[in-house]
Image (cartoon, rainbow, N blue to C red):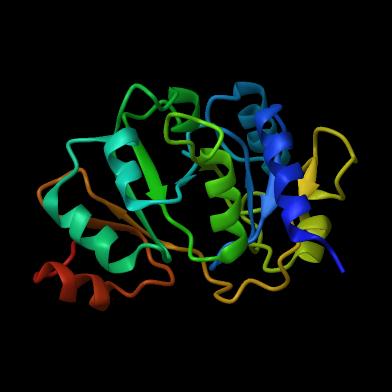
Amino acid sequence: MVDMSAQIDRAVEVLLGGGVVAFPTDTVYGVGALPTKEAAIDRIYSMKGRPRSRALIIHVHKREAMSDIADNVPDYARQLAEAFWPGALTLVLSRTEAVPAYVTGERPTVGLRMPNHPIATRLLRALNEQSDATVGIAAPSANRFGDTPAATAQEVVARLGAPGSGDSSPDMILDGGACPGKVPSTILDCTGEWPRVLRRGATSVQAIEEIIGRFVKQ
């Protein structure tokens, strides 16, 4: 039986050392690195074949991280985080200077999500136990750009290669079995007076509208 605690500890070491780790979330597997490790972020873009203009979502372990990573957070965004985090909703907000521009496609915004998966949660908490500041993981889905997202560790290997295959594959995969959701998160632009849907996903627009009490732009 795999000792997941030991695997989490090793994943933290890999990330802190500037490596890339694939891990399960409540939607699909992500492939991530610390936002401050530019070489690792470059590797993610390269291994995915992802355009540099496409920002990476930062995964966080608590709702309060919005105040550290984002500026000018509207009240409705906090309502949505309270209602759907942890869960399959990504909120795009104005970023602080703590978020490097190379993570966000040189845009002044950042996408934040709090995953609802025990392994992702443990990994994020273990990282933050070693830092005085909020630490997130910049992680798009673990697949080549435009391909179907990976829902299992085996699918990560099929799409990106096995760990140890070089810079074109992750340094480590945390195997958490099949992801329960298998559908990416819904992405909302929360930089305006009211939110706008950028990508439909696992969290329904109707559920979002019920929380904020008005229709959402699409």
Q: Quadrant of the N terminus?
A: bottom right
Q: Position of residue 67 (x, y in %)?
A: 27, 38
Question: Is 109 on the left-hand or right-hand side of 150?
Answer: left
Would you say residue 218 is visible in this rendering? no
Residue at 51% x, 39% y is 128
Residue at 67% x, 40% y is 12
Residue at 31% x, 27% y is 96
Along the viewing direction, whichever of 158 and 113 lies nearer the viewer: 113
Question: Is 116 on the left-hand or right-hand side of 3?
Answer: left
Q: Position of residue 94 (x, y in %)?
A: 26, 35
Would you say residue 87 is visible in this rendering? yes
Q: Position of residue 13 (x, y in %)?
A: 72, 35
Q: Quadrant of the C terminus?
A: bottom left
Q: Quadrant of residue 80?
A: bottom left
Q: Is residue 32 above or below residue 101?
A: below
Q: Is residue 105 above or below residue 151?
A: above
Q: Is residue 40 above or below residue 127?
A: above
Along the viewing direction, whichever of 184 and 135 lies nearer the viewer: 135
Report the number of discs. Answer: 0
Residue reaching furthest to the right: 165
Q: Position of residue 152 (x, y in %)?
A: 73, 68
Residue at 17% x, 76% y is 210
Question: Is 58 on the left-hand or right-hand side of 17?
Answer: left
